[in-house]
């Protein structure tokens, strides 16, 4: 089973993440940031991964350290659970609408971290998460998961745009990591991801 657990403690955060690629979309998420919990829950349900996150952060200074460090740890635990990536689809793209908003995500789980992010938010999402932190979470994840992602989000409601983005990311990541080849090969001309 493709699972992993990572604990990371710094002067700013104390985070434990348990993760399974072969899950059923269940999880327990406690970050201390209710809207971020909601986004990670949406990601979990639509990715069909199992995800448990326990995080304590210096929220009195703001959500930045907690959101960034969860992205880092989630990317690391994803990489450990994926292993060599034998037999995975590797590539995936999806479009997810949410009312007036739409998110498009295209991924390559190929060992090369890169993010192209198009779209904007009008202000702090739900008055809590500064808009740049949405992108920064994905940057932190992608750098540590070694994934290439192209993300585009549009719409009116910042809440809907953010939620569509997390859902689309989950659906695309599920598709890209699904085992579709039974020959045990790594889907790369280099032989490694």
Image (spheres, grey):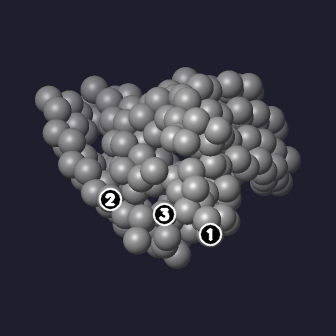
Name the foreground residue: 87 vs 145. Answer: 87
Q: Can you tell which mark lies on residue 182?
A: 1
Residue 24, compared with residue 153, is above or below; it is: below
* Kind of element beneath mark 1: loop
The Cα–Cα distance between marks 3 and 2, rounded to whole angstroms, is 9 Å
Name the foreground residue: 145 vs 169. Answer: 145
Q: State which tag comes first along the sequence, 3 or 2.
A: 2
Name the foreground residue: 34 vs 132. Answer: 132
On the image, numbered disc 2 is attached to which residue? 4
Camera-near label (2 vs 1) is 1
* Kind of element beneath mark 3: loop
| Residue 112 screen position, x and y as percent | 55, 30
Residue density around tag 2, few if under 14, some if 14–19, many if 20 or more, within 10 Å: some
Position of residue 120 in the picture relative to residue 15 (left or right):
right
- The residue drawn where x is 52% and y is 75% is 24
Q: Can you tell which mark lies on residue 21?
A: 3
- The residue drawn where x is 58% and y is 36% is 190
| Residue 162 screen position, x and y as percent | 64, 42
Would you identify the image quadrant in which residue 61 lies? top left
Position of residue 58 in the picture relative to residue 41 (left or right):
left
Q: Quadrant of the N terminus?
A: bottom left
């Amino acid at each position: 089973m493709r699972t992993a657990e990572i604990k990371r403690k710094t002067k700013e955060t104390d985070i434990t993440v348990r993760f399974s690629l072969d899950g059923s979309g269940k999880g327990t998420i406690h970050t201390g940031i209710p809207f971020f919990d909601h986004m990670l829950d949406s990601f979990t349900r639509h990715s069909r991964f199992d995800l448990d996150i326990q995080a304590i952060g210096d929220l009195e200074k703001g959500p930045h350290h907690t959101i960034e460090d969860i992205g880092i740890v989630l990317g690391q635990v994803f990489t450990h659970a994926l292993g060599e990536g034998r037999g995975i689809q590797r590539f995936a793209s999806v479009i997810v609408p949410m009312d007036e908003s739409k998110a498009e995500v295209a991924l390559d789980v190929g060992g090369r971290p890169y993010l192209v992010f198009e779209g904007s938010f009008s202000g702090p999402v739900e008055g809590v998460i500064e808009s740049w932190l949405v992108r920064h979470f994905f940057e932190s994840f992608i750098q540590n998961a070694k994934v290439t992602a192209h993300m585009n989000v549009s719409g009116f409601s910042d809440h809907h745009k953010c939620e569509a983005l997390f859902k689309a990311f989950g659906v695309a990541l599920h598709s890209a990591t699904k085992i579709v080849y039974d020959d045990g090969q790594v889907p790369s001309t280099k032989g490694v991801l």
